[in-house]
Image (cartoon, rainbow, N blue to C red):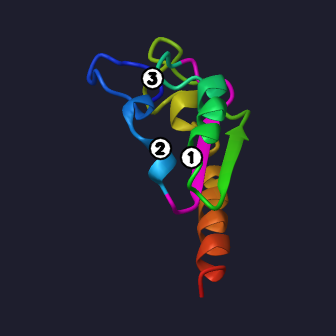
Amino acid sequence: MTGVGKSSPQTVQDADLSGIAVPVLILGHGNDDCRVTPWPEQEELAGRFRGSPSVETVRIDGGDAGDMSSPCGPFSHHGFLGQEERVVSRIADWIKRHVQGRR
């Protein structure tokens, strides 16, 4: 969450991200209409991980817009509806690349 939501007054923006010294993956949907997870803010967030050896941003597009009356729910772009396999595959590939590099 890059913006304040109903359930939390704090966001990732409040954390000291410069001290994180492990690889970072930021993955979001380009059409996510949730007001606390907009893609442009996620992309900007990458620059705050100054201590990380690797920061990768991955934008997912497409899939099913689903329930537009609930843009922050799992059955919308926010939940990567219709993109689940692609998202899991991207995350798994990222993990594998970074685990193999540490052996």
Cβ–Cβ under 8 Å for marks 1 and 2: yes
Residue holding disc 3: 72
N-terminal of the pair, mark 3 or mark 2, is 2
CA gap, disc 1 and disc 3? 26 Å
In the image, what residue type sits under mark 2? Leu
Callout 2 crowding tier (Cα within 10 Å): few <14, some 14–19, many ≥20: some
Residue 95 lies in what quarter of the image?
A: bottom right
Residue holding disc 1: 49
How many tags in the picture? 3
Which dot, 3 or 2, sits closer to the camera? Answer: 2
Question: Which region is colored magenta?
Answer: 21-33
SS under mark 2: helix
CA gap, disc 1 and disc 2? 5 Å
Which dot, 1 or 3, sits closer to the camera? Answer: 1
Cβ–Cβ under 8 Å for marks 1 and 3: no
SS under mark 3: loop
State left or right for residue 9 relative to residue 85: left
N-terminal of the pair, mark 1 or mark 3, is 1
Q: Locate the N terminus and report the quarter of the image it occupies.
A: top left
N-terminal of the pair, mark 1 or mark 2, is 2
In front: 26, or 77? 26
Does the magenta-highlighted stretch encompass residue 22? yes
Residue holding disc 2: 17
Identify the disc placed on residue 27.
none
SS under mark 1: loop
